Amino acid sequence: MSGYHLMKKPKIEIEEREEEEPEEEEPEEEPEEEEPEEEEPEEENNDGNDGYMDEQIRNEQEEALVALIEHRTKEVEHLRQRIKYYKSQLDEAEKRLQDTQNKLARLRGRNNVKASKNLTNGREELKVERISPSPIKMSESSSQKQSQLTPSRPNQETMKPSGDNLNVSRRTPSPFHRSGDSSQNQTQSRPQLVIPAVTSNMSQPTKTKESGNKASGGSGSLPTSSAPTHVNSLSKLKGEHKTMETQPNGTKKKLEQREHEDLIKLISKSSSPVTIRCQTGCLLSSQHKRKLRSLVLCPTNDQLFVTSALDGVVNLWQVQGRGSTANLLSSTDCQSDKQRRWPEDIAWHPRGNKLFSVYNADGGDSQISLLNLNKGKERTRVSFLQDKPHIKGIINSITFMPWDDKSFVTGGSDHGVIIWTEKDGEDSWKPKTLHRGHHSSAVMGVAGMHHRDIVMSAGADKRIIGFDVLAGRTDYKHQIESKCMSVLPNPRDFNLFMVQTGTPERQLRLYDLRLRQMEIHAFGWKQESSESQSALINQAWSPDGLYMTSGSADPVIHIFDIRFNSHKPSQSIRAHQKRVFKAAWHHALPLLISISSDLNIGLHKIT
């Protein structure tokens, strides 16, 4: 038994040793448990570094913001200075705009008080007529003021005893005006009827040289015409002829600029037209062998007009017996130098002493000719300008500019619009191309606006262009649905102009220069003999600007009242046997003058 106990004892010791073994391992694990405690000082060092870096970053950001604030402060100050500068510029621009508007208002006659300060004695008559535009106020007081004029108008007093002259000046617009609105134009147009006749002296010696016996017959009929006393004024003082020639022209232009009337507001406002009574009894042989092409009235002598035809001849006519007939004063062969072409279009020089004709640019032929009416021999009367600026094709139109008697404009089939300016020396004219790329087809008509240096052109490419000569750029541009064949400014409303188109029953379009791409009204007619529209058909404004006349493929003259709210003619007058090319209003007499393909000239009295 005791042996068994002795043997079991070691087992217990072994078990106790086995149980003690884990306790002996505990000290070996203790360093592992203390390792985290040794790392705590390292974390505290990292936190300190992070705080230092954050502070550094904050300092850098603060410095950057301070610098940015300084930069933006300077920027604000700079912008304030610029705003101050532009405000001053804006004030100056507003002042310039106001000055320009005031000038425009004075130009249009809206500011009579300011305009009267700059008026000369020769223009005082116009101011009197503006104050009393009504025909009812044509009293003795106004006639007394009109008699107190400068030395350039003393001949007007000698006209008073002449009953014919007074009747002409008073009856001139009466057939055209049958309403209250249009009667205002009756008195305002008086200066234009007297002043141009002064320069008719230039044509009187021409008649003597040109026509021989015919001229003597014409001079004998002068006492029955509208300006007999002006011939006497030339015979009294030939030395003053040059002064009298230039001064009335300048005075006339000033009067025209001051006679602007707002007619646009009257367009299409009346439900019924104001018709005129027209007698169509007198037809004269034109003395041309081929179809007529042009009819132009003299701008300075109310008795004279010219006709041209395809025979190349230009005939000078004198109205007789207050429009009952006309005498042929002279016939001049004006065919081109090389190809013997006829004049395509004719324009009077504003002084009334020369005629300018345009031809064809093909084959190196002459493009412009001058017919000097003061020269007697036919060979020396016609001369040709040497410059040939048009490239090719027909030169369709020529017209003098209303703002300057030393420049005219031509338009041709080469798409070009050329302005010609008179230089030093006799018959010396230099061309300058205004534009050649604004039209893609032939330029059919050109004209100058009265109150601005703008040249209007109408083309077969359906475009209407207004070119500012002073600025050298396009000021007006419009394109329509039909080809354009001519352009014609209104003589009284300087913003109104008419364009002839090829659209049946809408041939004549009215436009306002101030409104872009906007048609005010359209007139037209229906042709019986032909549906096509010919560029040879021309129009004309009445002196008061309220009526238009137009030729037609039919033997009739169409008359349009712009106040009539219809697209049809206010009346149509059967005046010829064949196509009517043009019917022009006489400046001083109640008379329409027409030309036709029947080779006749029509004189139609308005009663």
Image (cartoon, rainbow, N blue to C red):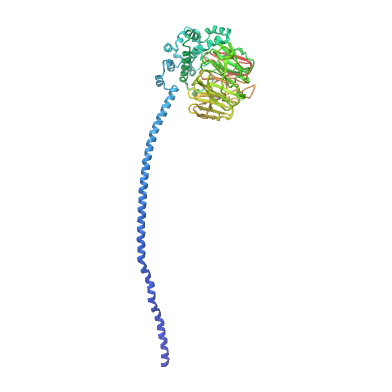
Taking the image as shown, residue 518 lies to the left or right of residue 89, namely right
Using the rendered view, name the quadrant where residue 11 is placed. Answer: bottom left
Q: Whole-percent x and y of residue 404?
A: 49, 21
Would residue 88 be visible to someone looking at this image? yes
**Is 394 situated above or below 142?**
below
Q: Position of residue 442 (x, y in %)?
A: 59, 27
Foreground of the two, 202 or 19: 202
Is residue 444 something that shows in the picture?
A: no
- The location of residue 603, given as percent across then percent down, is 58, 13
* Occupied quadrant, residue 557: top right
Q: What percent of the width, then of the height, locates residue 164?
A: 50, 8
Residue located at (41% from left, 87% from top): 10
Q: Quadrant of the N terminus?
A: bottom left
399 on left or right of 130: right
Question: What number of labels is visible?
Answer: 0
Quadrant where the C terminus is found in the figure: top right
